[in-house]
Image (cartoon, rainbow, N blue to C red):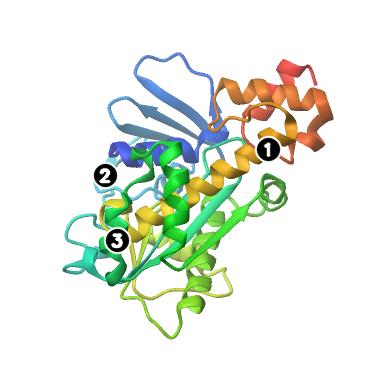
Amino acid sequence: MNTIVLKLSKIQLDQLKAHYAPFTVPTKTPYTLFVAKKSGVTITGYTSGKVMFQGTNAQSEASKWDNKNATVASNTSKKNTSTSNGKNNLPTGGLPKDFAKKSIIGSDEVGNGSYFGPLVVCAVYAASENLAYLKEIGVKDSKMLTDKEIRQLAPKIEAVVPFQKLIVTPKKYNEIQPKYNAVRMKVALHNQAIYLLQQKIAPVKEEGILIDQFTSEANYRKYLQQEKNQVTKNLYFVTKGEQYHLAVAAASILCRASFLAELDAASMKLGFVVPSGAGSKSDQVAAKILQQGGITLLAQYAKLHFANTQKAQKLARY
């Protein structure tokens, strides 16, 4: 059985935790953030920032996460498996000079780690002449903004820059999820949003495409080969992409605003608040929905493959 240990940044660790949220299992181990089991691999995240992958397929699972300090151990030997996926993956020094001042398409997504609500992907074309205005109105990482600020900023952004949003409702998500794992689904959506946005702005051509990194470039391109309209040139991948260009920051705000609007709509239809995230509140609300209309109703609002579904069924005795 192979064991792989990665040392990740806080941002990478948050992304990994959200990615494996549907597969988490209860744990009381000290200094442990989460334990997840997927495809025969046990993934354990620690407060130190380290993540351990254990199992026969540990190496292939760990390879999805771009990292330069990975150590691989087997029953008989240890070896360094540090890899680099090219300069485009480097948050520092990997982007062209004055990249933040260029006319860029940036893409981001919201909702992947939330049990309720859609998966939203958005691509924004922020031309150099619009950057000063975007900065002036307060465009920055959506995580640094309140929901109220996000709702106020979104229409201002949409009035100035070309964008393309793709919203996968929970109902649609549940239909395609057995065929598309979380990474493949996001690759397909990012690629399609970027492709459609390129058609909108043509004949104008962006100077680069920055994707807020959710998997390694090699993994992204692997899944990209399965898509019809492949955007393959001038791609750059960095974590926390909103720090490197306002196009990604604007995309993250538009994603979050749409996600919040969908949760609001769901809350209005059901008559009670539908939460974001995948915690105990989600379990309780899901149990309430099950009691109202069973799994058919729940499928309209939640991503059923999350572990929350089983927890809700126990609560509802469904």
Check disc 1 and give the amino acid type: Ala
- 6 horizontally vs 273: left or right: left
Q: Disc 3 vs disc 2: Cβ atoms closer than 8 Å?
A: no
Badge 3 marks a residue whose secondary structure is helix
Q: CA distance from mark 3 to mark 1?
A: 33 Å
Image quadrant for the N terminus? top left
Residue tagged by mark 2?
79
Q: Residues within 10 Å of mark 3 (few under 14, many from 20)?
A: few
Badge 2 marks a residue whose secondary structure is strand
Query: Which of the two labelled residues, at mark 2 and mark 1, occupies the earlier sequence position?
Result: 2
**Label ID, residue 133:** 3
Name the spot of residue 215 as percent of width and height, x first.
41, 52
Q: Residue at x 76, y 18 (%)?
A: 316
Name the spot of residue 290 as percent of width and height, x first.
78, 26
Check disc 2 and give the amino acid type: Lys
Residue tagged by mark 1?
266
Kindly give the residue lying farthest to the bottom in the view shown. Answer: 203
Q: Residue at x 70, y 46 (%)?
A: 174
Q: Disc 3 vs disc 1: Cβ atoms closer than 8 Å?
A: no
Q: CA distance from mark 2 to mark 1?
A: 50 Å
Name the spot of residue 311 as percent of width and height, x first.
66, 22
Q: Is residue 29 above or below residue 34?
A: above
| Mark in front: 2 vs 1 | 1
Task: Say whether residue 117 is visible.
Answer: no
Image quadrant for the C terminus? top right
Check disc 3 and give the amino acid type: Tyr
